[in-house]
Amino acid sequence: MRTLTTDPYPTPNELRVLLAVGREGGFSAAAAALGMTQSAVSHSVRASERKLGAVLFDRGRAGATPSAAGERALAHARRVLRLLDVMGAEVRGAAAGGADEAVAGPLRIAAFRSAALHLLPGALARLTARHPELAPEVRIVREVGRGTAGEVLDGRADLGIATLGTTSPVPPALVGGVLLEEGYALVHPAGHPAPRSLPLVDWAENCTSYTREWWAAQEWLPAATVEAEDDGAVLSMVSSGFGMAVMPELSLIGAPPSVEITDLGPDRPTRSVGYVTTPELAKSLAVRALIRELRGRAG
């Protein structure tokens, strides 16, 4: 019978060292953060590189920066360590005598601004009322580029609230589902006699594949005069009489009386808001419980 004398993959402790070097930007800083010597950190990183067969950090006078292979390794390291945490929590909960006890500890959520403000709070309130040992951590992430799905892929979030659709589907490495469909409406200063004559205010997250085709067909819509940081800034500008905007429903919850919301008709653009997570975490008790609450809120 063959006995393996060395672990063919990085150990959890070696993964933690990799993450510390990536987070701190150097071996010395990582050593200080971990309470290790620099030589021990260097040895650990070299062991991981040897096991994985790739250089994970570019070393230089300024410190250490992840290589392309290193970035991929760090993403996997975060996800592996998170699964170990989940395994420990659920096993201890089951040993304590029930599944509910396992719904405990941190639950990391990435959401774009309007979802964090208007979709998550009720769901999280119900979730923590049922599972008081659960500690949700919500980070607002701009839904541009890799967006919230990228946070899940990189192991920084357990679940992301994302915009989904045929042109921005759930990434192949993730699983997900639609929570709600939200329509867009014209927003303009209340009482304005000719709102469509106003300048257009927009923000980067709004310029998505869901609206481009519709947008291009609207001769009355000019190019955006001002691009704001987020939908809250857009709504504030419209409220002050600065211009008009085309905004999705979640962004308009709690809109002040100084703005008027006009329906764009049956051909209005819509977008799907959903969730994404990893196939492994989708089976975890905490993520499953959150998805149930989100579906209840969306319904």
Image: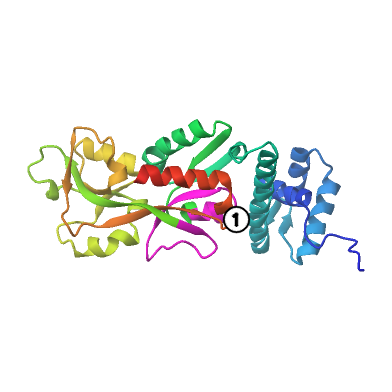
**3 part of magenta stretch:** no
The location of residue 40, given as percent across then percent down, is 85, 48
Name which residue lies at 38% across and 66% down. Answer: 167
In the displayed structure image, the side of residue 293 where residue 78 appears, left or right? right
Q: Does residue 289 appear anywhere in the picture?
A: yes
Comparing 266 with 26, the one in front is 266
Give the percent coordinates (x, y) of residue 50: 81, 63
The chosen color scheme is: rainbow
Q: Nearer the viewer, residue 133 or 60?
A: 133
| Quarter in which the N terminus is drawn | bottom right
Residue bounds of the magenta highlight: 149-176
The answer to whether residue 219 is left or right of residue 76 is left
Residue 145 visible (yes or no) = no
Q: Residue at x 10, y 40 (%)?
A: 192
Total marks drawn?
A: 1
* Amino acid identity at mark 1: Glu
Q: Where is residue 171 drawn, in percent x and y?
A: 49, 63
Disc 1 residue crowd, few under 14, some 14–19, many 20+, Cα 10 Å: few
Residue that label 1 marks: 280
Q: What is the residue that sits farthest to the front in this orientation?
A: 97
- Residue 169 is covered by the magenta coloring: yes
Q: Is residue 257 placed above or below 7 in the rendered structure?
A: above
The residue sitting at 88% across, 63% down in the picture is: 4
